[in-house]
Image (tube, helix red, strand yellow):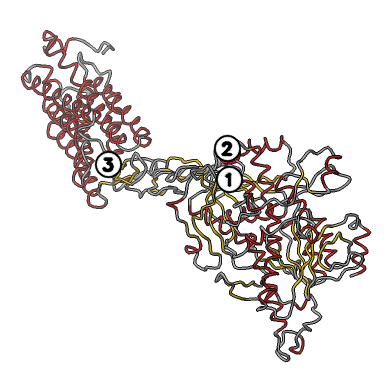
Amino acid sequence: FSTALTYLKYLGFHSAVITTISKKGDIILGGLFSLHDMVEEQSLPFTSQFNFRTFRWMQTMIFAIEEINKEEKLLPNVTVGYKIYDSCSTPHQALKAAMELMGGEKSSEVGEKSHRSSTCNESVPLVIGDGGSTQSLVVARFLGVFTVPQISYFSSCACLSDKKQFPAFLRTMPSDFFQVDALVQLVKHFSWTWVGVIAGDDAYGRGGANIFANEVCRTVMNTSMNIFFCELIQQAEISSIISVIRLSGAKVILVFAVEHDAATLFDEVQRCDALWLASEAWSTASVLSTPEKYHHILQGTVGFAIQQASIPGLRDFLLRLNPSRSDARTDPFLVSFWEEVFHCTLGAQTESREKEGESKPPCSGEEDLGNVTNIYSDVSQLRISYNVYKAVYAVAYALKAMKSCVKGEGPFFQRSCADPDVIQPWQVRLHQVRYLNSFASEIKFDENGDPAAMYDLVNWQMNPNGELKFINIGKFDGMTGDIKQKLYIHEDIILWNGNRTRVPSSVCSTICPPGTRKAMRPNFPVCCYDCVACTAGKISNLSDAIECAQCPPEFWSNAERTTCIPKRVEFLSFRDTMGITLVAISFIGSFSTCIVVLIFFCKRTTPIVKANNSALSFLLLFSLTLCFLCSLTFIGQPSKWSCMLRHTAFGISFVLCISCVLGKTLVVLVAFNAKLPGSNVIKWFGPSQQKAIIAICTITQVLICTVWLLVAPPAPRQLMPREEDFIILLCDEGSYIAFALVLSYIGLLAVLCLLLAFLARKLPDSFNEARLITFSMLIFCAVWIAFIPAYISSPGKYATVTEVFAILASSYGLLGCIFAPKCYMILLRPEKNTRKHLMSKAPSGKF
């Protein structure tokens, strides 16, 4: 111990004289309170500012000690004394005070029966304090080396729960772990998913802010910013913080800082449309609620505060102070306190203050504290004071347990008890304390030295007198296992910036309505996203959907993308424009064919009709009519029978047609190639033989179609493209081989007919029909050769349109090329419709 103190002195921790107040007793309790917010050092121009609130805490410790001594119930025949130091809100001053409590520093000590001349004072077995987490970290490390119990009343940093680093540290202030849990539950309760965090640049602020950020990362909430600042922050940095607040878009901002750091922030943040969440360090701070300049900023603030209590007799004890009596000699802090309260200079201090240029009126010392309303005398919000009160009584109960220990049942080696007359610090078993105080609250510590976490939820409301008041609107019980029962909020009495009904909204992104999904923004937290409409064919029927659901193949999304509806069925319908057009073209072709039949029937005795084999011509016209009409079977909703009919009717009709053309071509070719008049060759191609050729060719196609229908008949089939909003209803060929055979057989006859007609094109005759057949077959072949790639590449119903177009185009080609010139001669050149004219000329080589 001596070596450690010598080393600390060598480092410079012995230069300043520390002010203390003490009272002798059988057991001396140490105390650390930050009575001054700034440290008086000769090398720095700072002046100290007396803290009324901390002075009340110190007086509460003295009150509790005197109450214990007076009642003599807890510790009979034992007088508890105290030795209290001012830690001046800085870690190194707190360490100096702790060193003195351990008997290693000189002090400016004033008290009853004090020993100023001693250079090594008697050490204390236990220390109550310090208030700030930063100071307690330093003190706890120092006291932990010597296993001196330390019980803090205001240090909430979660890091202090680490028993490996701070084995002797306890507190009556809940850990920030519980406070953060309460804040997270509060944020979740009001659905705030985008919360800004501003924290003090110290152990309390950084520790709490980091825990809060880690906790919200486990939920859908996120922090929009994490900013750390200190009390001595520059104006430029404050302006930067304000800019970040505005750019973040957060409407709820948590300030995790001690009251003086928070005051520094709010001095500059005069215009900020946000709801402030207060950490317990400033949630009931009068230094922020009293000045009117903060009212318009902090009205509506919500925060958690430790539980309060009304301590009987404390107010009278606080008002007992009077420097005109002996209090000034026993309390060295009284003079500073009195001068701060009444803004005057006491007695001997007047002359020195005048020399320093300060002009304050003198004090008589007879002023009445009861006539002054300030933080010190305000006992309406006894929260930290209650913690101090509980800490003193916890020590008393621990000492009582030591005094009442029965030999053979003690907690130490061989079940021994501690010597009640010589108390060693490590023998004070504070962590085993458990008692029910006069306020019906159970006081106990867990394995980390932390108390039960109980918080009041307070709301800063403006009363009719223009004063900010702390209104209890709920509570948080950290010891409850059920998460739903941890937080209770009475929402009806909350005032949100003067509005009782409108709960502020703080979200990075609004709720995505049904029909949309979340699209995460790059480099942003998970709660920041854009609402993107579901793509066609997908839906979302819930709000804030992460993904859109794919509709089943036979369904499609509606316009709002909220439900799946049956896809529309698409086929070549009689009601479509394309269907109506094709039907019209088909009927026109059929009608035109019927007109030709009528013309030929009326002119059946004329040479041109006789010369072109009228029987085959009528049969050819009949087959052309069937070709025109079979195109109608391709239009309309496909069914089992219509699918079988359309392909067989098409195949048989066209084979009949081409067979007739082939028969006509063979007759022409054989007739004009007979070498001798009266040759018997022509008899093999008479009318009966021609009909037989036509019948054989047609029956062959009929057999192919019959086998096709028996083995793999065409049938309706639905095509359901994923990326389209319709179902294509078409006729599946059933057997592609059979379909290919049907087309190939038609093509074979057409090519054969074209070849024969080409060979007969220059035969002598005034009206050579072979030329007309050649042209018709050229058109026919060209149409069907172009049909194959067009049919394969056409999607959906357009494949059917392509097939119908090919049927109609080839039919018109046959009708026009073979019969149009004949009708022209019959109707417009009747003078050429004579036997003489037909037999008079050789072929001219022109059409």
Quarter containing the C terminus = top left
C-alpha separation, residue under disc 1 versus residue under disc 2: 10 Å
**Residue at mark 3:** 569
Q: Which mark is residue 272?
A: 2
Q: Residue at x 33, y 27 (%)?
A: 782
**Residue at mark 1:** 253
Farthest residue, direction top: 831
Q: Residue at x 16, y 17 (%)?
A: 822
Amino acid type at circle 2 is Cys
First reached walking from the N terminus: tag 3 or tag 2: 2
Disc 2 on helix, strand or loop? Answer: loop
Out of 613 and 582, give the one closest to the viewer.
Answer: 582
- Residue 116 screen position, x and y as percent: 89, 64
Q: Is residue 319 above or below residue 522?
A: below
C-alpha separation, residue under disc 1 versus residue under disc 3: 56 Å
Q: Are marks 1 and 2 in contact (CB under 8 Å)?
A: yes
First reached walking from the N terminus: tag 1 or tag 3: 1
C-alpha separation, residue under disc 3 versus residue under disc 2: 59 Å
